[in-house]
Structures are given as C-alpha cells and as structure tokens.
Image: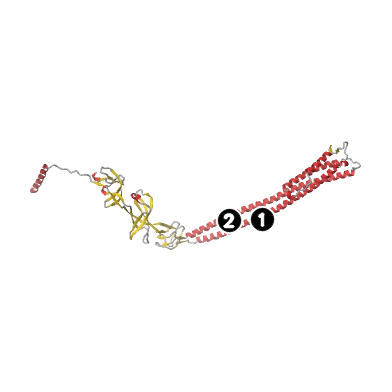
Amino acid sequence: MKTLSFLTLFVSLFFVGCASETTPFVEKIEPQAFVLHRENFQPELSLTGSVQSEKEVPLSSKISGHVEALLVDVGDSVLEGQVLLKYVLGDNASQVDFQNSLLQLDTTKMVAEDAVRSAHVNLQTMESQHNQNIKQTDVSIQKIFETLLTKINNTKTLSQQILRFLDQTMGASSQFRYQEDGTTVEMLGYGNTVDKQKLLNWIENLARKYPEKNVDRWNISEQEILLEARSQIDFLKDLKASTELFYQLAVHTPTVSDFSAEKRDKIASQAADYLRSIDADIFALQTQMESSIVEKETLQAGLLKTYNAIKDAEAQLQLSQASSENQVSSAQTRVNLAQTFQKELILRAPFPGVITQKFVEVGELVSPGNTVLELADMSILKVNTSIPDTFIGKIKKGMKADILLDGISGTYQGEISKIYPSVDSQTRNLGIEITFLDPSDDIKLHMFARVLLRFDSEQIFFVPREYISYAADKSFVFLKDGTKVSVKTGTEKDGFVEIFSEELQEGSALLFPSSL
C-alpha cells in the first residue's frame, strides 16, 4: 500500500516537472466539410402496388326473385352475352303478364285499326256525297236560272208586244180626237190632263232603254241573270205606268165616225188585258227570281252541310288515328316493360372476362341492387401505385417499367398508362397506373407487385445522410458560411442521398450540422 502511494506521487511529480519545462499547445480543429461534386447517375425508382383489372365490375340483380340456376363459378372465363345466372318468380307472374300484354297489344291494334278504317270509310262516303251534291247542285242551279231566264225572255216578248201596240196606236193620231186644241184630253178621276206627245216620247224612251233582245244562258252568269230579272221587273213597272196612261187616254177619247165607240172599247179592252198580263208577269218574275235565290241558297247550304260533314269526318279520322296511336303505343310500352322484365330474369355477361367473386347460391332470394357476381376483364391488367412528387418531372405516359410478382418467376414488361392529375396532400405522392404489355394467365388479380422505373442518366449531387437536417417535413443542408439551404431529397444508396436545389453549385462545401 505504501509502495503504491509512493509510485503515484512520483508519477505526479514527473508530469509536473515536465509541464514546468514545456510550453502548452492547443490544436485548432476546422469544421468538417463535404465538397459537392456531380456524379453520373441513372436513377431507379422501386414501387409497390397490386394487380388490378382495367374493367372489374359487380353484377347486380335488377329484380326480386330466387336464384334458379347459377351457371358459372369463380375463375370461370365467360364470353360477352353468355348466360351466367337465372332467376325465377314464385308464381311465374312475369310470364303471365308478358302473355297478357302481348294479347292486349294485339287486341288494341285490331280495335285501333277498325276505328281508323271506319273513319276512313266515313270520310270517303262524305267526300263522295259532297262531290255528288256539287254536281246535283250545279245542275239544279243551272235549271233554276234557265227557268228564270226563260221567264225573263217571255216577259220581254210580251213587253215588246205592248210597246209596239202603244206606239202604233198612239202614232195613229187620226184614231183619236182631243178637246179644243187637239193636244190634251181630260183624264177622268185624276184631275189633270194627259199630254199625248209626252206619252209618245215616254214609250219611245222605254223602247230605247229596254231594246228587244233575248239573253243566251251560256253567255251570262247567275248574277247577271238576277240583274237582268230586276231590270225586266223595272221595265214592266214602267210599261205598266205607260199602259195605264194609254188606257185612260183611250177610254176618254171622244168617239167620231172613224173612231167608233166599239173601236175605242176594243182598244181599251186590249190595254186592260195588257195591264193584267203585266201585273201577272211582274208577280211571276218577282216570285221566280226570289225562288231562284232561295233555292240556290238552299242548295249551297246543303253543300256547306256536306262540306262540314267532310271536315267532321277528317277531324274524326285524325282523332281516331291519334287515339289509336296512343293506345297502341301504351300497349307496346307494356309489352316492352314485360319483355324487359323477362330479360332481367336472365343475367348475361356484359363483356368477356373472368368471374372473380360469387356472392349467391342456387335458391337464395335476391332483391334489386344485390350484387350476385363480380366480373373482370383479364385482357388488360395494370398495377396501381404512386411515386414521390420529386419524380413528377421525370415520368410521362408510355414510359416503360419492369414488373415483378410474388410467386411468379421472371419479369413482366409494362408502361405508364395513366398519371393522376393531383398529388395526395398527406403523402405528397402522385398516383399512376402501369399496364402490363405481356400479361399471362398466371397473373391473378390483387397480387402484390413490385415495379421498377429506370430514368435517364443525369448529373446529380449525392451527400452523406448525416449532412442533411430535417424539420417540419422539410430538408436542409448548411453551406460552409453557415447559410441554410432548403433541398429536396431523392434516391438513397449506401448512406448517400440525392439532393436537389438551385442554390447548390459544383464545388459548394457543406458543413456537418453538429460542427455549427
């Protein structure tokens, strides 16, 4: 124990002596730095995902019923339109409703066709009757006006005969004697005198105003015939007035040896007969004219009636056609619905593919919307995965990729077929889809897949992981002068990490964070 203490004391004194004889030395250590140099590097990005089908859809029931037959199982390949499953209703109501709808459609069509056919026949009958009425009316109106025209011409013949009688009788002045001056005669009962010359002038005017002529039916219209009738009536009235004056003149003319009372009475009697004939003709012509107008209006009213009947028949035909179309359309709709319902009793494959899942068995009850099978199109397979947003600028559609599948040896070729439009705000990853270029039957849906993307070679900076600082999901490095630079990180290999920043240059020196 004493020996050990002595030895300790000796060593201590030795070091103290040495210290007193030498100058103390403190080494100045420079902060550790890493100088950046670009390296030629071909980046690779390894991703993981799962195998999916381009088209994988659930097949659902559209009706309520029991599964009568299930004709496929999971893993079966099917063709487009192939029957997969059949339903059945307990009371077979769909088939009964379908047959009833067909029968009702046939009945509706027959009734509708009969209604339209009947309306057509009625319209044709009305049109035929109307055309016949037009012909009959034309003939009847023609006869009416021919009769009226004959009457006009007959009265004209009589009128001209009377005019000639008056003119000839009045012109034979030796047959008449007049009071005192030989120009006037007292008209008994009238209190005035008759001027013989004025009467002659009046008769001459009538002859000029109403010349002796007959009217041809084929050169005159119905309206002109009516005007001619009215003109003839006016003429007869004027002629009657002239004849009455003549009659008064004749009966009051004094008799002489060459103008005996017998001759005077004969002339007066003839004038009286003419007056009666004129009255009869005026009445007959007036009646005939009015009758012609009434008969024509009656016939035209008949035409209007048949014309309106045609319009009613046309409207009935249109109504029947519209009603028939509506009825047939409604019946056809019911048939279509029944046919659709019939089709829904059979589930067919909408596209070729493989049955991936089965959710029902024979005999089970299903309701509308229940998923019964799942079908996938295995001709186009893809891997759904995502990449960090730092690689967004390096990828594009059509870019090739290697795909490795657990449990299957070898590498499959693929290409980027879809790039999603937005980055996940939480993970900062961007979704992509990679489609197999050479899929095989060994590939199964939802298999775990590894994807390798190889990018073009480029000059990049790699730094030791320890030179990167992290804070609040951001990465930093420090320059030799202490400047803090924000960077993005990329590929990592052998403890070195790829960094990106526009502030970093070739030859820039980075400080080890702990040396600050």
Q: Nearer the viewer, mark 2 or mark 1?
A: 1
Closest to the observer: 85 or 198? 198
Closest to the observer: 166 or 284? 166
Residues packed near mark 1 inside 10 Å, few (<14), some (14 to 19) or many (20 plus): some
Q: x%, y% of residue 279?
A: 80, 45
- Residue in the image at 74% along x and 46% along y: 226
Closest to the observer: 36 or 51? 36
Which of the 4 image quadrants contains residue 480? Answer: top left
- Mark 2 secondary-structure assignment: helix
The disc, 2 or 1, on the residue closer to the chain's N-terminal end is 1
* Amino acid bearing label 2: Ser
Q: Count every numbered label the image shows and give the total.
A: 2
- Residue in the image at 56% along x and 57% along y: 328
Q: x%, y% of residue 463?
A: 27, 49
Q: x%, y% of residue 481?
A: 26, 42
Give the farthest residue toward the top. Answer: 181
* Colour mapping: secondary structure
Q: Is residue 116 above or below residue 261?
A: below
Residues packed near mark 2 inside 10 Å, few (<14), some (14 to 19) or many (20 plus): many
Q: Badges 2 and 1: C-beta atoms under 8 Å apart? A: no
Distance between the alpha carbons at the discs numbered 2 and 1? 25 Å
- In the rendered image, which residue does mark 1 sit on? 128
- Mark 1 secondary-structure assignment: helix
Q: Is residue 392 above or below residue 20?
A: below
- In the rendered image, which residue does mark 2 sit on? 324
Q: x%, y% of residue 468?
A: 27, 47
Q: Quadrant of the C terminus?
A: top left
* Amino acid bearing label 1: Ser
Mark drawn on residue 477: none
